[in-house]
Image (spheres, rainbow, N blue to C red):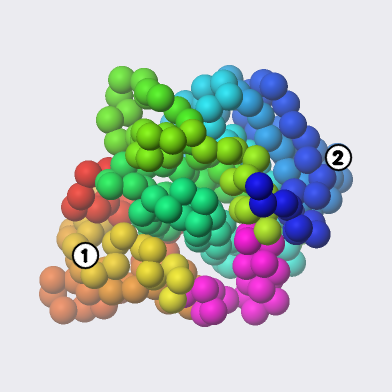
C-alpha cells in the first residue's frame, strides 16, 4: 500500500468514528490554531454537508469523509482555484488506484459514466481581508453499495468496479499528490502548469454545456479552462465567455446534473 510521504498535508490527523461534519470539526480545530495540512476524517457523518445546503449521504465505514485545513497566503479571488487543484489530485489518485475512467465535471465534481462519485465543499474564513483558513471538505463514495432514493446520479468506486477499495491507500496517495500540486499552486498562484492535466480529465471540454446563471439559462460549447481555472465557453451568438464558478451551475448534457 502507498505510504504517505507528504510533509504537511495529512501529517496531523484527527480520526473519528462519528462527527456531525468533518468540515465543522475542522473549523473548530482551525479556530484552535491547528496547522496547515491538518486532516480530519470520520467513519460516519450525521450531518454531512453538500453544496447549496444539500445533505451529503455519509454512511458508516464505506466512504472517505475528510476535511483538510489550509492557510495559504492568497488573494481571495484565487481561493476558488484550490478546489480545482484538489479535484484534479483526487481524480488522478482514483484513476491510479482503481483504473476507473473518473472524470472532472467542472469545477470539481468527480464523475464516472455520468454519475457522481466525489464532491468537494470548500469553506473560507477571512480576517482583515486575508485568508485565515480554508476547509477543503472531500467526500468520496468508496465502498457504498446503495444510495438513498432521490440520488439517482450517485455512484461509488465499488459499484463501478465491483471491487472494494482501500480507503487508507486513497488518503495517502491523495495527500502526496495534492501537496505537490498545492505547493506549486501557492508559489505560482496560477493553474497554468496543471491546466493540461485538468483539461484532459474535464468531461465538459469539447461538449455542449447548459449554463444556469441568475434565472438565465443558455447552452454553449466548452473549449477549455483559463490559467485561473475559469471555464471558457463559446456561446451560440459567437461570443466567448470565461465562467467562474461563483453562483452559476454548469450542467452536462449527459447523465448527472448538478
Ligand atoms: C458536494 O455537494 O458536491 C460537496 C460534498 C462534500 C462532502 C464532504 S464529506 C466530507 C466533508 N464534510 C462535509 O460535511 N462535507 C464534506
Left or right, 113 with respect to 194, comes to left
Rounded to the nearest angstrom, the CA distance separating label 2 from label 1 is: 45 Å
Q: Is residue 72 above or below residue 40?
A: below
Disc nearer the start of the sequence (2/1): 2
Of 69 and 168, which appears nearest the observer?
Answer: 168
- Residue 176: give its label: none
Of 117 and 208, which appears nearest the observer?
Answer: 117
Which x, y percent locates residue 120? Answer: 51, 46
* Mark toward the viewer: 2 or 1: 1
Of 52 and 35, which appears nearest the observer?
Answer: 35
Q: Is residue 16 above or below residue 101?
A: above
Q: Does the magenta-highlighted stretch encompass residue 183?
A: yes
The residue that disc 1 covers is: 207
Q: Residue at x 23, y 59 (%)?
A: 209
Give the residues in magenta: 177-195
Helix, strand or loop at label 2? It is loop
Q: Residue at x 52, y 51 (%)?
A: 97
Report if residue 132 is visible in the image.
Answer: no
The reply to whether the C-beta atoms of the residues labelled 2 and 1 are less than 8 Å apart is no
Which x, y percent locates residue 240? Answer: 26, 77
Q: Residue at x 65, y 79 (%)?
A: 188
Q: Does the magenta-highlighted stretch encompass residue 249?
A: no
The residue that disc 2 covers is: 32
On-image quarter of the C terminus: top left
Q: Main secondary structure of the magenta part?
A: helix
Which x, y percent locates residue 170? Answer: 59, 46
Callout 2: CB less than 8 Å from ligand 1 = no
Amino acid at each position: 500500500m502507498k505510504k504517505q510521504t507528504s510533509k504537511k498535508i495529512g501529517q496531523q490527523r484527527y480520526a473519528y468514528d462519528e462527527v456531525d461534519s468533518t468540515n465543522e470539526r475542522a473549523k473548530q480545530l482551525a479556530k484552535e490554531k491547528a496547522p496547515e495540512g491538518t486532516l480530519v476524517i470520520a467513519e460516519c457523518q450525521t450531518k454531512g454537508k453538500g453544496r447549496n445546503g444539500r445533505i451529503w449521504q455519509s454512511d458508516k465505514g464505506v466512504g472517505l469523509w475528510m476535511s483538510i485545513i489550509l492557510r495559504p497566503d492568497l488573494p481571495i479571488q484565487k481561493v476558488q482555484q484550490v478546489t480545482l487543484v484538489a479535484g484534479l489530485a483526487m481524480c488522478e489518485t482514483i484513476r491510479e488506484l482503481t483504473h476507473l475512467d473518473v472524470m472532472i465535471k467542472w469545477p470539481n465534481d468527480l464523475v464516472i459514466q455520468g454519475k457522481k462519485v466525489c464532491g468537494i465543499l470548500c469553506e473560507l474564513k477571512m480576517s482583515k481581508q486575508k485568508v485565515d483558513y480554508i476547509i477543503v471538505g472531500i467526500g468520496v463514495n468508496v465502498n457504498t453499495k446503495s444510495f438513498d432514493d432521490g440520488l439517482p446520479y450517485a455512484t461509488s468506486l465499488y459499484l463501478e468496479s465491483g471491487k472494494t477499495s482501500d480507503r487508507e491507500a486513497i488518503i495517502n496517495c491523495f495527500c502526496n499528490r495534492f501537496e505537490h500540486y498545492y505547493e506549486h499552486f501557492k508559489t505560482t498562484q496560477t493553474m497554468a502548469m496543471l491546466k493540461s492535466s485538468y483539461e484532459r480529465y474535464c468531461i465538459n471540454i469539447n461538449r455542449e454545456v447548459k449554463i444556469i446563471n441568475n434565472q438565465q439559462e443558455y447552452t454553449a460549447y466548452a473549449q477549455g479552462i483559463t490559467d485561473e481555472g475559469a471555464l471558457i465557453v463559446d456561446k451560440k451568438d459567437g461570443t466567448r465567455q470565461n465562467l467562474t464558478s461563483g453562483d452559476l451551475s454548469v450542467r452536462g448534457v449527459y447523465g448527472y446534473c448538478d
